[in-house]
Amino acid sequence: MSIRLENVSFRYLEDTPMETDALTDVSLEIEDGEFVGIIGPTGSGKSTLIQHFNGLLLPTSGKVWVDGVDLTAKGTQLRLIRQKVGMVFQYPEHQLFGETILEDVGFGPRNGGLPEAEVVERVRRALAYVGLDFEELKDQSPFELSGGQKRRVAIAGVLAMEPSVLILDEPTAGLDPKGREEILDEICTIHKERGITVILVSHSMEDVARLADRLIVMHRGRVALDGTPVEVFRQADTLKSLGLGLPQVTELMHELKAKGLAVNTDILTVEAAEEEIVRVMGGQR
Amino acid sequence: MRFRNLTIGQHIPGNSVVHRLDPRTKILGTTLLIVLLFAVDGFIGYALAALAIAAVVHLSELPWRYVLRGLRPLLVILLLTVGLNVFLTEGEVIFRLWFLTVTREGLVRGLMMGTRLVLLIMGTSMLTLTTSPIQLTDGIETLLGPFRRIGVPAHELAMMMTIALRFIPTLLEETEKIMKAQMARGADFQSGGLMQRAKNLIPLLVPLFVSAFRRADELAIAMEARGYRGGQGRTKFRELRFQRIDAVAMGLSIIFTVVVGILF
Amino acid sequence: MKGQPLIRFSNVNFTYAKTQTRDGWQALKDVNLEIYEHEFVAVLGRNGSGKSTLAKHVNALLTPSSGQVLVAGLDTSIPEHVWEIRQKVGMVFQNPDNQLVATTVEEDVAFGPENLGIPSAEIHRRVTEALEAVGMLQYRLHPPHRLSGGQKQRVAIAGIVSMRPKCIVLDEPTAMLDPAGRQEVMQTIHRLNKEEGITVLHITHHMDEVIGADRVLVMDQGRIVLEGTPREVFSQAELLRELHLDVPQITDLGQRLRKRGLAVPQGILTVNEMVMHLCPSD
């Protein structure tokens, strides 16, 4: 299930004094099964971009295809597309409404017209993916949970549609480190086990470097860089000029190299940095 | 979002004479206009009132289209008022259209009601267009001040208005966000019968209320932490001051209202 | 650090009462703490560690179930003191949207001084000064909803500064901000601490935000479990990880390299420091 954008531009509040270009001439394709990280400063067009992936926004000009279906064509059933391209918004727990967790998490599949038995089955599976117990929680009110648990229930509400593409807009914002790590691990598991495409918008260079196999860097409504994390983080100067940083360890390797140390700078994780520094400096115990 | 076209309650900053008037002058002036519009009964009176409004619009240096745009969202109400009056007033029949009867009296009344409504909307939108919400609130608070002794909560009302104005954009944004999030889960806010549609709003309204209460709670704590304890002993950042121009404007409005109101 | 502490917690316990939806629980357990004027103290802890409860005790939004909190010698549990305490200790909260009251930036900054009954002309002076101190003067007429998260928090801080407090308590002011916003806020509070001499109590779960602090307290399950300079605290990387705090990559790497036998000291805080130790230049 691929997503393809061709020369997409989007303008907010067209023909008013507040008119702003949010996307300008964006062309890109996301293939089946990719794990894509989208990074960029606030206001760079990340949120606008991802809302084009499931037809919540339609381009002012240009075309969007999801799974071969042209979203801009008249009569396209956007509701069907949205069952396939699931989207988790920022602070998703703010959208909880159900009297019970079963009702809330089952909202998506029920809207998709599934029979109740199948809905229940899907809720069970979705809750399992985010590490929550169906039997224990199904009849509880989602409003009685802790902050981290609410977030997971909300994510489960999107997973329950069993989408082929999962878009997440800063799913860990405001969580503490433990909650952050757990949610990212769960997303990774889903990506691996179900083979679904994951598109993750994040401010954490460390997270996207570790998780994604492709990074799209947005700047002022355009795609500034697009490549593997290694390729993107090689462009340290470009990233800096866009107001973005590097993962701390990558920055360290760049600094060490500038000091004349013969280190490989294509390092994205603490483990790799440890090995590389030991390899280069190992002798000097 | 549809709400964005609404001019009523939308302030357009400027530095004209009208903008610079004390909000109290403008509030009282608008009140006089409303009284006048209900007192006069005849097209000469309306024409004079329209002339006065036109003069104010001219002095405010605002483009006419902004002032007229305020009418658009209320077009339905306007047409309904005119239509009901035209078709439902009994009297001398001019012509029949299928089952509708148009009478001379109906036509006159419809036109009068229509004019009255148009002038009313234009007059009040002049107040909100040229007065910032803050000034408006300050104006209302000071005008109501003397009535505090008989139990009118002037400060509390003003504070409520301020907070409402502060949070309307935030809540609109939030509404849009929740709507999109639920649409991403297949929610449908457009189709279905009335009952179905009302039911479909639950996934929007519940989170909106939950969030509004959370905001209210947090705001109350933040206000308390900043030493808020009601209107007592509170000073004002902005103090209202009557200028000579206010006296002139007030005087003119009163004379105009009295003369036009009595004569026509 | 001499004389009387500005803030003193003595054996403070606090228990939240049982409600319909939640059981009661003890959020602070036997907390003892002294904060002196002009200090910059950071409090680290995961969600539910009691750090926000601690913050709310400093300006009497909460009062101890047992024990005593003194602010400039005033007991917070005596209702007559509350008014004076809130003039001395201002508080900035997590959600930038839910603490701004007014429809323009300057009106909002004036809200506190208005409550204190300060004359209009003086409020105008203070508003200008406070907005200047947080670098938001050019936005004075903007409506808050048009500002970025970081800008909103700076306005919230200005709203406290205009009350001329001795101390500002910031309860996770950066939790909802993007990296640029976090940086803006951190720079602002450090400047206020250095230049205006305002005592700062900064609550956070981001470890990199405690770097410039004079002192760091780490909380877990209602207790202060670790206290020291940032370096002292960071050198306990393992303990911090057990407490579910996220150790910056560079500190983590430093610790790993030490284990592998490289000459790296404990508690490395920044990339520069690490470079200095790995390549001691000339």
Image (cartoon, helix red, strand yellow):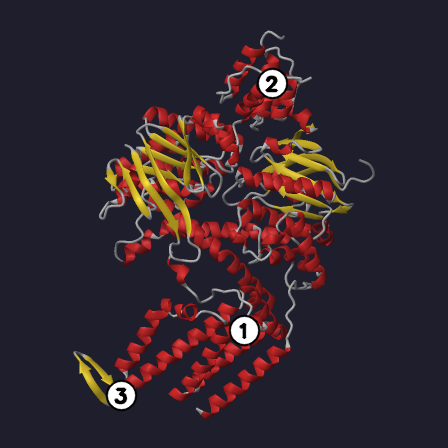
Classify mark 2: residues with Cα within 10 Å, few (<14), some (14-19) or many (20+).
many
On the image, which quarter does residue A15 sit in?
Answer: bottom left
Residue in front for this viewpoint, A209 or B100: A209
Q: Considering the numbered disc 2 on the image, is that residue within a helix, a strand or a loop?
A: helix
On the image, which quarter does residue A134 sit in?
Answer: top left
Residue in front for this viewpoint, B119 or B152: B119
Q: Is residue A207 above or below residue B45?
A: above
Residue B128 screen position, x and y as percent: 49, 69
Q: Which residue is mark 1?
A: B18
Query: How far, Cα to Cα, is label 1 from label 2?
Result: 69 Å
Classify mark 1: residues with Cα within 10 Å, few (<14), some (14-19) or many (20+).
many
Q: Is residue C32 above or below residue B87?
A: above
Left or right of C207: which side holds B184?
Answer: left
Q: Considering the numbered disc 1 on the image, is that residue within a helix, a strand or a loop?
A: helix
Asked whether the residues under marks 1 and 2 belong to the same chain, the reply is no
Residue A189 screen position, x and y as percent: 39, 25
Query: How far, Cα to Cα, is label 1 from label 3?
Result: 40 Å
Q: Amino acid at mark 3?
A: Arg
Q: Which label number is shown at residue C255? A: 2
Judging from the image, mark 1 belongs to the subunit labelled: B
Residue in front for this viewpoint, B109 or C178: C178
Query: How far, Cα to Cα, is label 3 from label 2?
Result: 94 Å
Q: Which residue is mark 3?
A: B104
Left or right of A226: which side holds B102?
Answer: left
Q: Amino acid at mark 2?
A: Gln
Q: Residue at x 38, y 40 (%)?
A: A50
Left or right of A51: which side holds B239?
Answer: right
Give whichever of discs 1 and 3 has the lower sequence position: 1
Q: Residue at x 67, y 48 (%)?
A: C133
